[in-house]
Each structure stands twice: as structure tokens, then as C-alpha cells.
Image: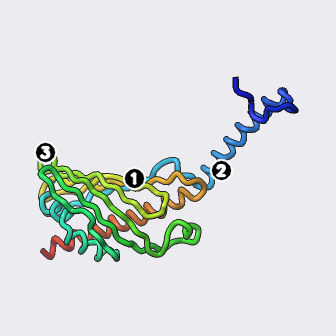
Amino acid sequence: MSSPPFSGPNSDQSDWPLLAAAGRMIDCLERKLCRHFGDSEIPMKISANHRYSHNTDVLYSMFTDSKEIKAKQIALGARKIRVLDCEKESDGATVRFVRELPAKVPGILSRFLQPWNSVEQSERWRSLKGEIFKSNLTIDIANVPVTVGGTLKLKPVDDGCVNQVRLVIDCSLPFVGNTLAEFVAADCERLVTAEYKYITDRLASA
């Protein structure tokens, strides 16, 4: 049988219940502090439905073409863009690229984020029935303890198609985790909106 905490030759067994109660109180206080100061227990979600007047094949081609990827990232303000993988297969495509993106970082987050941050994005596209294309994606911000993942789904609709964008942003870091996740989520939403405008303009001028 294992010895209770702080047991020893001079310990008083009558103190054990008090020590156990103190430990529970400390655990409870830590959980309350984390919730109060922004420990992100519930992931943040972004949901957008982007409609286009073109079919899914056209949009799929744009998302899986290295030249289109680079042009789009330049338009979004990125620098040092490198397409690491852009390979089409019979049932889909694998896309992976890295770039540096600018950020107006508040002082409280300056230990995690820089004015320019290296961001790697990976997409695994699958061709489904009914001219539907779906991608699982992950976004990795270098040295930032935030997870970003989600899906893109291209579906035919009347007079074109829709891109269903779903992202989940999470950070388990205590105290500033919620603030960090909120900042990343806001920037993701900004980029999602800017990307939609770029693609719409790009298709209109084609």
C-alpha cells in the first residue's frame, strides 16, 4: 500500500484529510483562475458559405494549381511563399504550402506572435460523387500553441457552386490561451473573407 503525501516519521495521520482537502481546493482554484483569465476550453469555430457562378471543377482546379496558389497568397499579403506539394491523383489531390503572413500583434501576445509569422497549410482533397470535392485541412503557425483545422467542401448549386468553409481554432494554454485563440480566429476569418473576394474577382476577370 502506498504512503499518503507528506508521510514520514514525524507526520501526523490526523493531518491527511486536511491535506487532501487542501489539494482539492487548490485544483478547484486553478480551474477557476484558468476560466476567469481565458483558458480556452471550448474551441472557436468559423463557418462560411461562399457562392460562385462557376462549377466545382473550376474552383477545384484553382485550389489545386501551384501558380494559382502563389498568386492568391501574394494578393492576400503573404511573402516567402513556397508550394511544398501540389500533386493531383485519380481520386483527389494533396496540397501543402508555407508562407509568411503579417499580423498586428497586441502586446499581451508578443511572446507568441511576431509581425511576420510562418504559416504552413496542408490540404487533402477527395473527389466525391455528384461533382463534390472535399478537403481536410490543417494550418500550423510556427511556434504558436494554437491548433487550426477544418474542411473545405465544394458542392454544386443552382447557377454555380458553394464552398463550405468550416474551421476550428483551439488553444489549451492557460490564462492567455483564450486571447490567443481569439486573435488567431479573427485573423483566419479576415483571410477567409479576403480569399473569397480574391477568387470572385479572379473568376470575373478570367
Q: Residue furthest front?
A: 9
Q: Residue at x 12, y 59 (%)?
A: 57
Q: Residue 196's image quarter?
A: bottom left
Please tell me whether mark 3 sits on a helix, a strand or a loop. Answer: loop
* Measured Cα–Cα span from mark 2 to mark 3: 49 Å
- The vertical placement of 70 against 51, above or below, is below
Q: Dividing the image into 4 quarters, which one contains the N terminus?
A: top right
Q: Residue 137's image quarter?
A: bottom left
* Measured Cα–Cα span from mark 1 to mark 3: 26 Å
Which amino acid type is shown beneath numbered disc 1?
Val
Which amino acid type is shown beneath numbered disc 2?
Leu
Pick the residue in front: 93 or 165.
93
Q: Earlier in the sequence, mark 1 or mark 3?
A: 3
Mark 2 nearby-residue class (10 Å; few <14, some 14–19, many ≥20)? some
Which amino acid type is shown beneath numbered disc 3?
Lys
Q: Position of residue 170 (x, y in %)?
A: 46, 53
Q: Earlier in the sequence, mark 2 or mark 3?
A: 2
Residue assigned mark 3: 129
Q: Position of residue 62 (x, y in %)?
A: 18, 65
